[in-house]
Amino acid sequence: MTELAAAGPVRSPHRAGGRTDPAGGLLTAVHDDVGRLTTTVNLAAFENVLSRTARAMLHGPLADRYLIGHEQERRGLDPLLRSGLLSAAYPGVDALERAASDTARQLLGAAWVDFRPLSGLHATISVFALLTAPGSTVYSIAPANGGHFATQPLLESMGRDGRYLPWCASAGTVDLAAFAQVWRAHPGAMVFLDHGVPLAPLPVRELRAVIGDGALLAYDASHTLGLIAGGRFQDPLAEGCDLLQGNTHKSFPGAHKGLVAFADAALGQGFSERLGLALVSSQQTGPTLANYVTTLEMGVHASAYTRQMLANQAALACALGESGFVVHHPPGATGPSASHVLLVEGGRQHDDADPYALAARLMHCGVMLNARPVDGRVVLRLGVQEVTRRGMRQPEMWRLAELMARAAHTEGATATAHVAGQVAALAGAFTSVRYGFDDSEAAC
């Protein structure tokens, strides 16, 4: 892009896939970015990969059409005239949504599910806007303790009184005794559990006991939604949450969208009615359909997928430790994580003073991840959800740790290219998507 900008207007055609590129080489550059996806191993904790079957919904003809309302709202209505908007009748889509909704309710232990939020943050906006009132108090987790950076600014912009939950750094969780005192002095309308580094379950039952039944307890499951669906993490709705919400593209391997699930159908139905009136018009039909397909895939494969995900996490943690990295263990925990997420604090042999520099070195070698501050220190944050869906198992986790150790010591273009080539070879052996409706050998 810099070279193109410096050169001024492009006057000669470029080629993309054997055809003239009408955008003056820009489409060719994007095509090259797509090609790089096949030469890297993605350990970012915040992404996943769609199956080929689900991905087809993103760009099919129906993706150009409106999908109006919640399936429950459309039942019994003239399919050509819904909510005052002219819309074609799509009985197949309605049936797919019903099946996905039934499956999601079963997987999450919910009485009501809404797939319409446009993202995890949009789900959060919708929950705050529709379930709390201006001036009410909402407690959440501070970003320094793993909470989402946008929660408090969002509450402030919406006229809510946002406050942070007391946190016990030594235990890595909410300080329940301190919070009980805070709550007695200043009760709120909602407690919003927005943890972005979920190494262990949160004390949902204990928090419900503190706040009683007069306030809402909401759980952001953006990272752990797939694990919850597979029965491999805590069960927020059964443990006392009124709702869980979040995005749908981390441990849950769907499209970039959002979801809200409710323990009580009446609360969920009221939320959905107001959501359609105030906060969602077009719900992005293509990604919504892709998430319906992914939900049905999880209905079949969630248990096996999440079991392998946790096995891979344990293997990678062990292998990284053997390779000289320091893997963070929560205080009092028997292992480094109960989820798909690992935190790595540099290493005994990889003693970069700056974890951001270490992350950059790994990414230049084709291992994609990120570094972020957690509890006063900067760590590497890794997730095994995508490599698991690509079909990698425990032996590949040991190979990854070996390559990461080599990458940590690379200096110079030649050494970086050599390690990157080995990473590309590993990535190239796992291009299919497992635990879905694709043929087992079909490329994504």
Image (cartoon, rainbow, N blue to C red):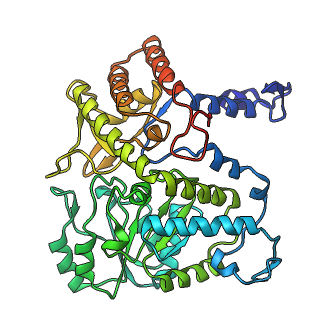
Report x, y in % for residue 316: 31, 34
Q: Spot the residue most to the top.
A: 414
Quadrant occupied by the N terminus: top right
Count every numbered label the image shows and give the total.
0
Report x, y in % for residue 202: 27, 64
Quadrant occupied by the C terminus: top right
**Residue at the (46%, 14%) spot, across then down:** 418
Question: Relative to 36, is 114 above or below?
Answer: below
**Residue at the (63%, 29%) spot, across then down:** 35
- In the rendered structure, the answer to whether residue 63 lies left or right of residue 405 reads right
Image quarter for residue 176?
A: bottom left
**Residue at the (57%, 59%) spot, across then down:** 257
- In the rendered structure, the answer to whether residue 46 lies left or right of residue 382 reads right
Does residue 257 show up? yes
Does residue 124 show up? no
Report x, y in % for residue 73: 66, 81
Report x, y in % for residue 165: 27, 69
**Residue at the (62%, 74%) spot, across then down:** 279
Q: Spot the residue most to the bottom.
A: 214
Question: Relative to 75, is 423 above or below?
Answer: above
